[in-house]
Image (cartoon, rainbow, N blue to C red):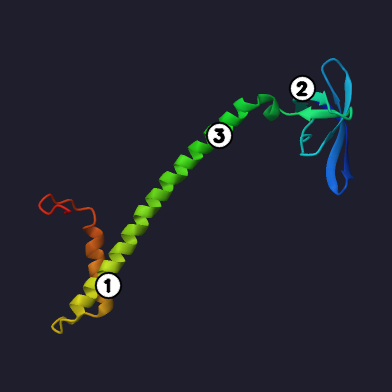
Amino acid sequence: MIYKISNKHNKEWNGKPFVEAELTDTNGELFKVSAWAGEFAGDTWDGELEKNDKGYWKLITKKSVGGSNFKAQQIEKTMERKEQSIGKFQDNKDWSIRVSSTMNKAVDLAIAEIKDIRTLNTLEADILKWREWLWNNWDVKDNQYPPF
């Protein structure tokens, strides 16, 4: 049910802020209610009211009315976001492995080449040369040399 909110007053109890307001239903019946979680943001509020064990009116939001159906929808949305983030993580992981491996192997190849006194390249130039070669040939698939 949609209630019209009137006479909002900001209050505090035991150091916790809350809003006290009057809700009017479509029949004109008036209910004095306190909201602790910012439920009274606009001029109307959509939900249900019920009395608690002390006799005060208590707000029942659509979340709690929906019960397990609402929770199931939230879980489904969370799982979709999780699947997307895992996919992004895998892409980043593949990229990181490629960057790390090419740099590592380029250094190894450059060190092996620099030992040969006949080359006039610097170590830095050889690292860049081998890293570029490895990066450009990373995805080459050659059936002549299987990986075993």
Q: Give the residue at the far top of this rendering.
A: 27
Residue 88 in percent (x, y) is at 42, 47
Q: Earlier in the sequence, mark 2 or mark 3?
A: 2
Q: Disc 3 marks which residue?
A: 75
Q: Give the residue at the far front of this rendering.
A: 53
79 and 17: which is toward the camera: 79
Marks 3 and 1 sit apart, C-alpha to C-alpha, by 47 Å
Q: Disc 1 marks which residue?
A: 107
34 w.r.t. 119: above or below: above
Q: Is 85 on the left-hand or right-hand side of 46?
A: left
Q: Decide: marks 2, 3 in contact (CB < 8 A)?
A: no
Q: Disc 2 marks which residue?
A: 2
Marks 1 and 2 sit apart, C-alpha to C-alpha, by 70 Å
Q: Quadrant of residue 8?
A: top right
Q: Give the residue at the far bottom of this rendering.
A: 117
Residue 104 in percent (x, y) is at 30, 68
Q: Earlier in the sequence, mark 1 or mark 2?
A: 2
Q: Is 121 on the left-hand or right-hand side of 65?
A: left
105 and 119: which is toward the camera: 105
Quadrant (top left, top right, bottom left, bottom right) of the C terminus? bottom left
82 and 132: which is toward the camera: 82
The residue carrying pointer 1 sits among few (fewer than 14), some (14 to 19) or many (20 or more) residues within 10 Å by Cα, namely: many
